[in-house]
Amino acid sequence: MGDRAGHANIGGVVGSGLCTQCGTCVSLCPRGAVTAEWSVRRGYSVRVDAALCNDCGICVDVCPGEGLDFTPGAWWREENDGAPVQDFLGPWRRLHVGWAPDEQTRYRGASGGIATAILQGALALDLIDAAIVCRMDPENSMRVQPLIARTAEEIAECRGSKYNVVATNTMLRRVLDEPGRYALVGLPCHIQGFRLAQARSARLRERVAFTLGIFCASSFEPRATEVEALRAGLDPGELARVSYRGPGWPGPLHLGTRAGDASESALSTYFPRFVRNASPLRCRLCPDALSELADISVGDTWLPRYEGTAGVSDLVIRTARGERLVDALAPGWLTLFASTPAEILQTQEETRQMKRDRYRGRMWLRKISGRPVPRNPGIAHETSLRDRWAGIKDLAGEARGRVEGRRYPSRS
Ligand SMILES: Cc1cc2nc3c(=O)[nH]c(=O)nc-3n(C[C@H](O)[C@H](O)[C@H](O)COP(=O)(O)OP(=O)(O)OC[C@H]3O[C@@H](n4cnc5c(N)ncnc54)[C@H](O)[C@@H]3O)c2cc1C
Ligand code: SF4
Ligand code: SF4
Ligand code: SF4
Protein backbone atom coordinates (compact mmCIF):
# COMPACT_ATOMS: atom_id res chain seq x y z
CA MET A 1 0.00 0.00 0.00
CA GLY A 2 1.16 3.51 -0.73
CA ASP A 3 2.02 5.26 2.49
CA ARG A 4 3.82 8.43 1.41
CA ALA A 5 0.78 10.46 2.34
CA GLY A 6 -1.51 7.96 4.00
CA HIS A 7 -3.85 7.66 0.97
CA ALA A 8 -4.76 4.45 -0.84
CA ASN A 9 -4.80 6.23 -4.22
CA ILE A 10 -4.19 9.72 -5.59
CA GLY A 11 -7.87 10.69 -5.28
CA GLY A 12 -7.02 12.38 -1.96
CA VAL A 13 -4.16 14.41 -3.49
CA VAL A 14 -6.38 15.64 -6.29
CA GLY A 15 -9.25 16.35 -3.89
CA SER A 16 -7.04 18.48 -1.66
CA GLY A 17 -5.95 20.64 -4.62
CA LEU A 18 -2.33 19.49 -4.47
CA CYS A 19 -2.06 17.79 -7.87
CA THR A 20 0.66 19.36 -10.04
CA GLN A 21 -0.81 17.81 -13.24
CA CYS A 22 2.51 16.03 -13.90
CA GLY A 23 0.81 12.88 -15.25
CA THR A 24 3.08 10.35 -13.52
CA CYS A 25 0.21 8.43 -11.90
CA VAL A 26 -1.48 7.93 -15.27
CA SER A 27 1.58 6.09 -16.59
CA LEU A 28 2.46 4.10 -13.48
CA CYS A 29 -0.97 2.74 -12.54
CA PRO A 30 -0.75 -0.97 -13.45
CA ARG A 31 -4.51 -1.20 -13.97
CA GLY A 32 -4.99 1.80 -16.24
CA ALA A 33 -7.33 3.25 -13.63
CA VAL A 34 -6.05 6.85 -13.78
CA THR A 35 -6.90 9.30 -16.55
CA ALA A 36 -6.05 12.96 -17.12
CA GLU A 37 -8.79 14.82 -18.95
CA TRP A 38 -8.02 18.22 -20.44
CA SER A 39 -10.21 21.32 -20.14
CA VAL A 40 -9.52 24.96 -20.91
CA ARG A 41 -10.45 26.01 -17.39
CA ARG A 42 -8.23 23.66 -15.39
CA GLY A 43 -5.81 21.95 -17.72
CA TYR A 44 -5.39 18.24 -16.92
CA SER A 45 -7.87 16.91 -14.33
CA VAL A 46 -6.77 13.58 -12.90
CA ARG A 47 -9.41 10.98 -12.05
CA VAL A 48 -9.35 7.46 -10.62
CA ASP A 49 -11.84 4.91 -11.91
CA ALA A 50 -12.96 3.25 -8.67
CA ALA A 51 -14.17 0.18 -10.58
CA LEU A 52 -10.62 -0.49 -11.84
CA CYS A 53 -8.58 0.62 -8.82
CA ASN A 54 -7.46 -2.01 -6.28
CA ASP A 55 -5.86 0.48 -3.85
CA CYS A 56 -2.35 -0.82 -4.53
CA GLY A 57 -0.94 2.64 -3.70
CA ILE A 58 1.59 2.81 -6.55
CA CYS A 59 0.16 6.10 -7.79
CA VAL A 60 0.63 7.61 -4.33
CA ASP A 61 4.25 6.44 -4.18
CA VAL A 62 5.11 8.19 -7.46
CA CYS A 63 3.09 11.37 -6.80
CA PRO A 64 4.98 14.60 -6.03
CA GLY A 65 1.73 16.47 -5.25
CA GLU A 66 1.98 16.26 -1.47
CA GLY A 67 5.59 17.40 -1.43
CA LEU A 68 9.12 16.11 -1.55
CA ASP A 69 12.06 15.68 0.77
CA PHE A 70 14.59 18.47 0.15
CA THR A 71 16.78 17.70 3.18
CA PRO A 72 20.53 17.17 2.55
CA GLY A 73 20.12 13.41 3.15
CA ALA A 74 17.17 12.96 0.76
CA TRP A 75 17.37 9.70 -1.27
CA TRP A 76 17.49 11.47 -4.62
CA ARG A 77 20.61 13.46 -3.69
CA GLU A 78 22.69 10.27 -4.14
CA GLU A 79 22.78 11.15 -7.84
CA ASN A 80 24.48 14.44 -6.98
CA ASP A 81 27.30 12.52 -5.27
CA GLY A 82 28.35 15.13 -2.73
CA ALA A 83 27.98 18.13 -5.06
CA PRO A 84 27.55 21.45 -3.23
CA VAL A 85 23.96 22.37 -2.40
CA GLN A 86 22.57 25.83 -1.96
CA ASP A 87 19.04 26.83 -1.02
CA PHE A 88 16.97 27.62 -4.14
CA LEU A 89 19.88 26.79 -6.52
CA GLY A 90 19.83 23.13 -5.41
CA PRO A 91 22.74 20.74 -5.95
CA TRP A 92 25.23 21.75 -8.65
CA ARG A 93 28.52 20.50 -10.07
CA ARG A 94 29.07 23.18 -12.70
CA LEU A 95 27.30 26.38 -13.67
CA HIS A 96 27.26 28.05 -17.08
CA VAL A 97 25.55 30.65 -19.19
CA GLY A 98 25.45 30.08 -22.91
CA TRP A 99 23.51 29.38 -26.07
CA ALA A 100 23.21 27.12 -29.08
CA PRO A 101 25.89 27.91 -31.68
CA ASP A 102 23.33 27.25 -34.42
CA GLU A 103 21.80 30.70 -35.04
CA GLN A 104 18.26 29.50 -35.77
CA THR A 105 18.18 27.21 -32.71
CA ARG A 106 19.27 30.12 -30.54
CA TYR A 107 16.98 32.70 -32.14
CA ARG A 108 13.90 30.46 -32.19
CA GLY A 109 14.42 28.97 -28.73
CA ALA A 110 12.82 30.39 -25.58
CA SER A 111 16.18 31.56 -24.21
CA GLY A 112 19.46 30.51 -25.85
CA GLY A 113 18.08 27.34 -27.47
CA ILE A 114 20.19 25.22 -25.11
CA ALA A 115 17.45 22.65 -24.46
CA THR A 116 16.91 21.99 -28.15
CA ALA A 117 20.67 21.90 -28.84
CA ILE A 118 21.23 19.34 -26.05
CA LEU A 119 18.49 17.07 -27.37
CA GLN A 120 19.52 17.36 -31.01
CA GLY A 121 23.18 16.85 -30.06
CA ALA A 122 22.39 13.78 -27.95
CA LEU A 123 20.40 12.34 -30.86
CA ALA A 124 23.17 13.08 -33.38
CA LEU A 125 25.82 11.48 -31.12
CA ASP A 126 23.58 8.41 -30.73
CA LEU A 127 23.20 8.91 -26.96
CA ILE A 128 19.39 8.77 -27.17
CA ASP A 129 16.78 7.43 -29.59
CA ALA A 130 14.01 9.84 -28.60
CA ALA A 131 13.04 12.73 -26.33
CA ILE A 132 9.90 13.42 -24.34
CA VAL A 133 9.00 17.02 -25.17
CA CYS A 134 5.84 19.04 -25.76
CA ARG A 135 4.19 21.22 -28.39
CA MET A 136 0.98 23.15 -28.96
CA ASP A 137 -1.64 20.59 -30.04
CA PRO A 138 -2.21 21.09 -33.80
CA GLU A 139 -5.91 20.25 -33.22
CA ASN A 140 -6.37 22.64 -30.27
CA SER A 141 -4.13 25.68 -30.01
CA MET A 142 -4.83 26.23 -26.30
CA ARG A 143 -3.69 22.76 -25.27
CA VAL A 144 -0.11 21.67 -24.75
CA GLN A 145 0.47 18.13 -25.83
CA PRO A 146 3.34 15.93 -24.65
CA LEU A 147 4.97 13.76 -27.28
CA ILE A 148 7.93 11.55 -28.05
CA ALA A 149 10.15 13.19 -30.66
CA ARG A 150 12.45 10.91 -32.66
CA THR A 151 14.06 13.30 -35.13
CA ALA A 152 15.94 16.61 -34.97
CA GLU A 153 13.02 18.23 -36.84
CA GLU A 154 10.46 16.98 -34.32
CA ILE A 155 12.64 18.26 -31.47
CA ALA A 156 12.93 21.66 -33.20
CA GLU A 157 9.15 21.81 -33.59
CA CYS A 158 8.86 21.69 -29.78
CA ARG A 159 11.25 24.53 -28.97
CA GLY A 160 9.98 27.54 -27.06
CA SER A 161 8.34 27.81 -23.63
CA LYS A 162 4.70 26.95 -23.30
CA TYR A 163 3.26 28.90 -20.38
CA ASN A 164 0.50 26.36 -20.07
CA VAL A 165 0.13 23.16 -18.05
CA VAL A 166 1.10 19.85 -19.61
CA ALA A 167 0.90 16.31 -18.22
CA THR A 168 4.29 15.38 -19.69
CA ASN A 169 4.72 12.23 -17.61
CA THR A 170 1.76 10.53 -19.28
CA MET A 171 4.46 9.71 -21.87
CA LEU A 172 6.27 7.46 -19.35
CA ARG A 173 3.75 4.74 -20.24
CA ARG A 174 5.26 4.69 -23.74
CA VAL A 175 8.77 4.50 -22.26
CA LEU A 176 7.70 1.51 -20.17
CA ASP A 177 6.16 -0.18 -23.21
CA GLU A 178 8.66 0.68 -25.96
CA PRO A 179 12.37 -0.15 -25.50
CA GLY A 180 14.82 2.62 -26.32
CA ARG A 181 16.97 5.36 -24.81
CA TYR A 182 15.00 8.46 -23.91
CA ALA A 183 15.62 11.99 -22.67
CA LEU A 184 12.92 13.57 -20.53
CA VAL A 185 12.40 17.34 -20.70
CA GLY A 186 10.17 18.67 -17.95
CA LEU A 187 9.32 21.27 -15.36
CA PRO A 188 10.48 20.60 -11.79
CA CYS A 189 7.30 18.69 -10.86
CA HIS A 190 7.64 16.47 -13.96
CA ILE A 191 11.19 15.61 -12.95
CA GLN A 192 10.11 14.99 -9.35
CA GLY A 193 7.34 12.60 -10.47
CA PHE A 194 9.76 10.89 -12.81
CA ARG A 195 12.38 10.38 -10.08
CA LEU A 196 9.74 8.91 -7.76
CA ALA A 197 8.63 6.61 -10.58
CA GLN A 198 12.21 5.69 -11.39
CA ALA A 199 12.80 4.72 -7.76
CA ARG A 200 10.34 1.88 -8.25
CA SER A 201 10.88 1.03 -11.92
CA ALA A 202 14.11 -0.59 -13.20
CA ARG A 203 12.85 -0.07 -16.74
CA LEU A 204 12.65 3.69 -16.26
CA ARG A 205 16.11 3.68 -14.70
CA GLU A 206 17.51 1.85 -17.74
CA ARG A 207 15.62 3.61 -20.48
CA VAL A 208 15.80 7.28 -19.51
CA ALA A 209 19.33 8.36 -20.38
CA PHE A 210 19.02 11.83 -18.85
CA THR A 211 16.58 14.43 -17.56
CA LEU A 212 16.60 18.04 -18.67
CA GLY A 213 14.80 20.25 -16.16
CA ILE A 214 13.28 23.58 -17.16
CA PHE A 215 13.27 26.34 -14.53
CA CYS A 216 9.72 27.18 -13.47
CA ALA A 217 8.24 30.07 -11.51
CA SER A 218 4.73 28.83 -12.29
CA SER A 219 2.74 27.14 -14.97
CA PHE A 220 -0.66 28.43 -16.05
CA GLU A 221 -4.15 27.18 -16.73
CA PRO A 222 -5.01 27.12 -20.46
CA ARG A 223 -7.75 29.63 -19.62
CA ALA A 224 -5.00 32.32 -19.46
CA THR A 225 -4.40 31.90 -23.18
CA GLU A 226 -8.13 32.01 -23.90
CA VAL A 227 -8.46 35.28 -21.95
CA GLU A 228 -5.51 36.81 -23.86
CA ALA A 229 -7.18 35.92 -27.17
CA LEU A 230 -10.50 37.44 -26.03
CA ARG A 231 -8.75 40.57 -24.76
CA ALA A 232 -7.16 40.94 -28.20
CA GLY A 233 -10.57 40.57 -29.90
CA LEU A 234 -9.70 37.15 -31.35
CA ASP A 235 -11.93 34.08 -31.31
CA PRO A 236 -10.06 31.48 -29.19
CA GLY A 237 -11.77 28.69 -31.14
CA GLU A 238 -10.19 30.03 -34.33
CA LEU A 239 -6.62 30.17 -33.02
CA ALA A 240 -4.19 28.43 -35.33
CA ARG A 241 -0.96 29.64 -33.74
CA VAL A 242 0.01 30.26 -30.12
CA SER A 243 3.61 31.03 -29.33
CA TYR A 244 4.48 32.34 -25.86
CA ARG A 245 8.10 33.28 -26.49
CA GLY A 246 10.44 34.02 -29.38
CA PRO A 247 11.66 34.29 -31.97
CA GLY A 248 14.24 36.59 -30.43
CA TRP A 249 14.61 37.18 -26.73
CA PRO A 250 12.54 37.33 -24.66
CA GLY A 251 10.02 37.37 -27.51
CA PRO A 252 6.30 38.21 -27.28
CA LEU A 253 3.12 36.16 -26.97
CA HIS A 254 1.93 35.71 -30.53
CA LEU A 255 -1.66 34.66 -31.24
CA GLY A 256 -2.83 34.05 -34.80
CA THR A 257 -6.16 32.85 -36.18
CA ARG A 258 -6.92 30.70 -39.20
CA ALA A 259 -8.33 33.81 -40.92
CA GLY A 260 -4.97 35.59 -40.52
CA ASP A 261 -5.85 37.95 -37.64
CA ALA A 262 -3.03 38.23 -35.14
CA SER A 263 -1.97 39.93 -31.92
CA GLU A 264 1.27 40.28 -29.99
CA SER A 265 1.88 41.13 -26.30
CA ALA A 266 5.24 41.70 -24.67
CA LEU A 267 6.24 39.18 -21.98
CA SER A 268 6.38 42.02 -19.44
CA THR A 269 2.71 42.86 -20.21
CA TYR A 270 1.03 39.49 -20.32
CA PHE A 271 3.12 37.46 -17.84
CA PRO A 272 1.94 39.39 -14.73
CA ARG A 273 -1.65 38.85 -15.90
CA PHE A 274 -0.98 35.11 -16.23
CA VAL A 275 0.44 35.07 -12.68
CA ARG A 276 -2.61 36.86 -11.28
CA ASN A 277 -5.34 35.13 -13.27
CA ALA A 278 -4.18 31.63 -13.93
CA SER A 279 -1.35 30.36 -11.75
CA PRO A 280 -2.80 27.12 -10.28
CA LEU A 281 -2.91 26.94 -6.50
CA ARG A 282 -0.37 24.11 -6.49
CA CYS A 283 2.15 26.31 -8.31
CA ARG A 284 1.76 28.92 -5.57
CA LEU A 285 2.74 26.20 -3.06
CA CYS A 286 5.77 24.93 -4.98
CA PRO A 287 9.35 25.62 -3.84
CA ASP A 288 11.28 23.86 -6.63
CA ALA A 289 12.13 26.54 -9.19
CA LEU A 290 15.31 25.29 -10.78
CA SER A 291 14.45 21.59 -11.27
CA GLU A 292 16.66 20.40 -8.45
CA LEU A 293 16.17 16.71 -9.29
CA ALA A 294 17.23 16.95 -12.96
CA ASP A 295 20.61 15.93 -14.39
CA ILE A 296 20.84 19.37 -15.95
CA SER A 297 18.56 22.38 -15.64
CA VAL A 298 18.09 25.33 -17.98
CA GLY A 299 16.50 28.75 -17.63
CA ASP A 300 16.69 32.34 -18.83
CA THR A 301 19.74 34.44 -18.08
CA TRP A 302 17.74 37.49 -17.03
CA LEU A 303 20.61 39.99 -16.91
CA PRO A 304 20.48 43.48 -18.43
CA ARG A 305 23.77 42.97 -20.26
CA TYR A 306 22.16 40.32 -22.50
CA GLU A 307 19.19 42.48 -23.54
CA GLY A 308 18.99 42.78 -27.31
CA THR A 309 20.85 39.50 -27.93
CA ALA A 310 19.33 36.47 -29.65
CA GLY A 311 18.95 34.74 -26.24
CA VAL A 312 21.05 33.44 -23.37
CA SER A 313 20.37 30.46 -21.07
CA ASP A 314 21.48 29.47 -17.59
CA LEU A 315 22.75 25.90 -17.40
CA VAL A 316 23.07 24.06 -14.07
CA ILE A 317 24.84 20.70 -14.24
CA ARG A 318 23.78 18.63 -11.23
CA THR A 319 24.91 15.03 -11.74
CA ALA A 320 27.89 13.13 -13.18
CA ARG A 321 25.57 11.97 -15.97
CA GLY A 322 24.76 15.59 -16.79
CA GLU A 323 28.43 16.51 -16.73
CA ARG A 324 29.40 13.70 -19.14
CA LEU A 325 26.61 14.74 -21.48
CA VAL A 326 27.61 18.41 -21.57
CA ASP A 327 31.27 17.47 -22.07
CA ALA A 328 30.30 15.31 -25.04
CA LEU A 329 28.24 18.15 -26.57
CA ALA A 330 30.40 21.25 -26.02
CA PRO A 331 31.63 23.12 -27.94
CA GLY A 332 30.07 21.71 -31.16
CA TRP A 333 26.48 21.81 -29.87
CA LEU A 334 26.80 24.29 -27.00
CA THR A 335 28.60 27.61 -26.54
CA LEU A 336 29.23 27.85 -22.80
CA PHE A 337 30.85 30.25 -20.35
CA ALA A 338 31.57 29.50 -16.70
CA SER A 339 29.13 31.07 -14.23
CA THR A 340 28.84 31.33 -10.44
CA PRO A 341 26.09 30.69 -7.88
CA ALA A 342 25.79 34.44 -7.31
CA GLU A 343 25.32 35.13 -11.02
CA ILE A 344 22.75 32.37 -11.53
CA LEU A 345 20.80 33.57 -8.48
CA GLN A 346 20.93 37.12 -9.82
CA THR A 347 19.29 35.92 -13.06
CA GLN A 348 16.43 34.40 -11.04
CA GLU A 349 15.61 37.10 -8.52
CA GLU A 350 11.93 37.44 -9.54
CA THR A 351 11.49 33.68 -9.56
CA ARG A 352 13.17 33.47 -6.16
CA GLN A 353 10.64 35.93 -4.77
CA MET A 354 7.81 33.76 -6.10
CA LYS A 355 9.30 30.47 -4.91
CA ARG A 356 10.47 31.64 -1.52
CA ASP A 357 8.73 34.80 -0.17
CA ARG A 358 5.38 34.21 -1.88
CA TYR A 359 5.62 30.43 -1.35
CA ARG A 360 6.13 30.83 2.41
CA GLY A 361 3.36 33.43 2.60
CA ARG A 362 0.85 31.26 0.72
CA MET A 363 1.83 28.17 2.76
CA TRP A 364 1.23 30.19 5.93
CA LEU A 365 -2.18 31.38 4.71
CA ARG A 366 -3.22 27.84 3.78
CA LYS A 367 -2.08 26.50 7.14
CA ILE A 368 -3.91 29.10 9.21
CA SER A 369 -7.06 28.40 7.23
CA GLY A 370 -6.67 24.70 8.11
CA ARG A 371 -6.26 23.51 4.53
CA PRO A 372 -3.79 20.87 3.29
CA VAL A 373 -0.34 21.96 2.14
CA PRO A 374 2.48 19.99 0.52
CA ARG A 375 5.18 18.79 2.93
CA ASN A 376 8.63 19.89 1.81
CA PRO A 377 11.15 19.13 4.58
CA GLY A 378 14.45 20.87 3.97
CA ILE A 379 12.79 24.09 2.76
CA ALA A 380 12.66 26.80 5.45
CA HIS A 381 9.05 27.59 6.32
CA GLU A 382 9.41 30.17 9.09
CA THR A 383 7.50 33.19 7.83
CA SER A 384 8.71 36.74 8.31
CA LEU A 385 6.26 39.65 8.23
CA ARG A 386 7.51 40.28 4.70
CA ASP A 387 6.61 36.72 3.64
CA ARG A 388 3.15 37.06 5.15
CA TRP A 389 2.65 40.31 3.33
CA ALA A 390 3.85 38.65 0.08
CA GLY A 391 1.29 35.87 0.63
CA ILE A 392 -1.55 38.29 1.36
CA LYS A 393 -0.66 40.45 -1.66
CA ASP A 394 -0.53 37.35 -3.85
CA LEU A 395 -3.91 36.15 -2.61
CA ALA A 396 -5.43 39.61 -3.20
CA GLY A 397 -3.83 39.73 -6.69
CA GLU A 398 -5.23 36.29 -7.44
CA ALA A 399 -8.73 37.35 -6.35
CA ARG A 400 -8.49 40.49 -8.49
CA GLY A 401 -7.17 38.45 -11.41
CA ARG A 402 -10.06 35.97 -11.19
CA VAL A 403 -12.56 38.87 -11.19
CA GLU A 404 -10.76 40.48 -14.19
CA GLY A 405 -10.92 37.12 -15.98
CA ARG A 406 -14.73 37.08 -15.62
CA ARG A 407 -14.89 40.00 -18.04
CA TYR A 408 -13.93 37.47 -20.70
CA PRO A 409 -16.40 34.58 -20.36
CA SER A 410 -15.10 31.27 -21.64
CA ARG A 411 -16.20 30.35 -25.18
CA SER A 412 -15.66 26.62 -24.68
C1 LIG B 1 5.92 27.21 -17.38
C2 LIG B 1 7.33 27.71 -17.49
C3 LIG B 1 7.85 28.56 -16.50
C4 LIG B 1 9.17 29.02 -16.59
N1 LIG B 1 9.68 29.82 -15.60
C5 LIG B 1 10.96 30.25 -15.70
C6 LIG B 1 11.54 31.09 -14.71
O1 LIG B 1 10.88 31.44 -13.73
N2 LIG B 1 12.84 31.50 -14.85
C7 LIG B 1 13.57 31.13 -15.93
O2 LIG B 1 14.72 31.54 -16.04
N3 LIG B 1 13.08 30.31 -16.86
C8 LIG B 1 11.80 29.87 -16.77
N4 LIG B 1 11.29 29.04 -17.72
C9 LIG B 1 12.23 28.46 -18.70
C10 LIG B 1 12.49 29.31 -19.92
O3 LIG B 1 11.32 29.95 -20.34
C11 LIG B 1 13.01 28.41 -21.05
O4 LIG B 1 12.12 27.37 -21.29
C12 LIG B 1 14.34 27.79 -20.72
O5 LIG B 1 15.26 28.80 -20.47
C13 LIG B 1 14.85 26.92 -21.88
O6 LIG B 1 15.09 27.74 -22.96
P1 LIG B 1 15.84 27.16 -24.24
O7 LIG B 1 15.92 28.24 -25.26
O8 LIG B 1 17.09 26.48 -23.80
O9 LIG B 1 14.81 26.02 -24.67
P2 LIG B 1 14.23 25.65 -26.12
O10 LIG B 1 15.36 25.22 -26.98
O11 LIG B 1 13.33 26.71 -26.59
O12 LIG B 1 13.38 24.35 -25.74
C14 LIG B 1 12.37 24.42 -24.77
C15 LIG B 1 12.09 23.03 -24.29
O13 LIG B 1 11.20 23.14 -23.17
C16 LIG B 1 10.13 22.23 -23.30
N5 LIG B 1 8.94 22.88 -22.73
C17 LIG B 1 8.37 24.03 -23.15
N6 LIG B 1 7.30 24.31 -22.40
C18 LIG B 1 7.17 23.32 -21.50
C19 LIG B 1 6.24 23.04 -20.47
N7 LIG B 1 5.22 23.83 -20.21
N8 LIG B 1 6.42 21.91 -19.74
C20 LIG B 1 7.45 21.06 -20.00
N9 LIG B 1 8.37 21.28 -20.98
C21 LIG B 1 8.23 22.40 -21.70
C22 LIG B 1 9.99 21.97 -24.80
O14 LIG B 1 9.53 20.66 -25.02
C23 LIG B 1 11.41 22.18 -25.33
O15 LIG B 1 12.08 20.96 -25.42
C24 LIG B 1 9.97 28.61 -17.68
C25 LIG B 1 9.43 27.78 -18.69
C26 LIG B 1 8.13 27.32 -18.59
C27 LIG B 1 7.60 26.42 -19.66
S1 SF4 C 1 -4.78 0.59 -9.04
FE1 SF4 C 1 -3.09 1.29 -7.72
S2 SF4 C 1 -1.99 2.72 -8.99
FE2 SF4 C 1 -3.96 2.44 -9.96
S3 SF4 C 1 -5.26 4.08 -9.16
FE3 SF4 C 1 -5.55 2.34 -7.84
S4 SF4 C 1 -4.08 2.63 -6.19
FE4 SF4 C 1 -3.46 3.93 -7.85
S1 SF4 D 1 1.20 11.94 -9.84
FE1 SF4 D 1 1.14 14.00 -10.70
S2 SF4 D 1 -0.76 14.03 -11.93
FE2 SF4 D 1 -0.89 12.29 -10.52
S3 SF4 D 1 -2.01 13.08 -8.76
FE3 SF4 D 1 0.17 13.24 -8.32
S4 SF4 D 1 0.69 15.30 -8.95
FE4 SF4 D 1 -1.27 14.83 -9.89
S1 SF4 E 1 5.38 25.82 -10.25
FE1 SF4 E 1 5.92 23.80 -9.47
S2 SF4 E 1 3.99 22.67 -9.55
FE2 SF4 E 1 3.75 24.45 -10.87
S3 SF4 E 1 4.30 23.71 -12.92
FE3 SF4 E 1 6.14 24.65 -12.01
S4 SF4 E 1 7.19 22.92 -11.07
FE4 SF4 E 1 5.12 22.26 -11.45
Image (cartoon, rainbow, N blue to C red):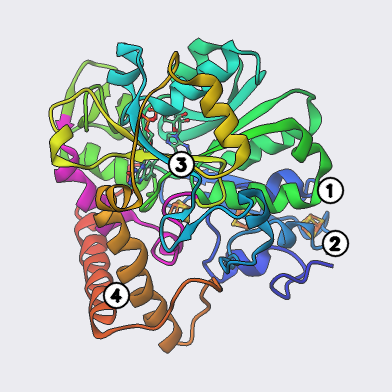
Tell me how far mark 2 sits from mark 3, CA to CA.
40 Å
Q: Does the residue labelled 1 lie within 8 Å of ligand 2?
A: yes
Q: Does the residue labelled 4 lie within 8 Å of ligand 4?
A: no
Stretch in magenta: 264-291
Hey, what amino acid is under mark 4?
Gly
Residue at image point 61% right, 50% down: 80
Q: Do the residues labelled 2 and 3 touch (CB within 8 Å)?
A: no
Hey, what amino acid is under mark 1?
Arg
Residue 56 in which image quadrant: bottom right
- Whether residue 256 appears in magenta in the rendering, the answer is no
For the C terminus, the image quarter is top left
Of pointers 2 and 3, the one earlier in the residue sequence:
2
Pick the front one: 234 or 244: 244
> In this view of the protein, can residue 130 be seen by the observer?
yes
Classed neighbour count for the residue bearing mark 3: other residues with Cα under 10 Å, few (<14), some (14–19), many (≥20)? some
Q: Is mark 2 within 8 Å of ligand 2?
A: yes
Asked if residue 325 is positioned above or below residue 382 in the image, the reply reads above
Tell me how far mark 3 sits from mark 1, CA to CA.
42 Å
The residue under label 3 is 94
Tell me how far mark 1 sits from mark 2, CA to CA.
10 Å
For the N terminus, the image quarter is bottom right
Q: Nearer the viewer, mark 1 or mark 2?
A: 2
The secondary structure type at the circle numbered 1 is: loop
The residue under label 4 is 391
- Whether residue 269 appears in magenta in the rendering, the answer is yes
Q: Which mark is residue 31?
A: 1
Hey, what amino acid is under mark 3?
Arg
Tell me how far mark 4 sits from mark 3, CA to CA.
33 Å
Classed neighbour count for the residue bearing mark 2: other residues with Cα under 10 Å, few (<14), some (14–19), many (≥20)? some
> In this view of the protein, can residue 138 be seen by the observer?
no
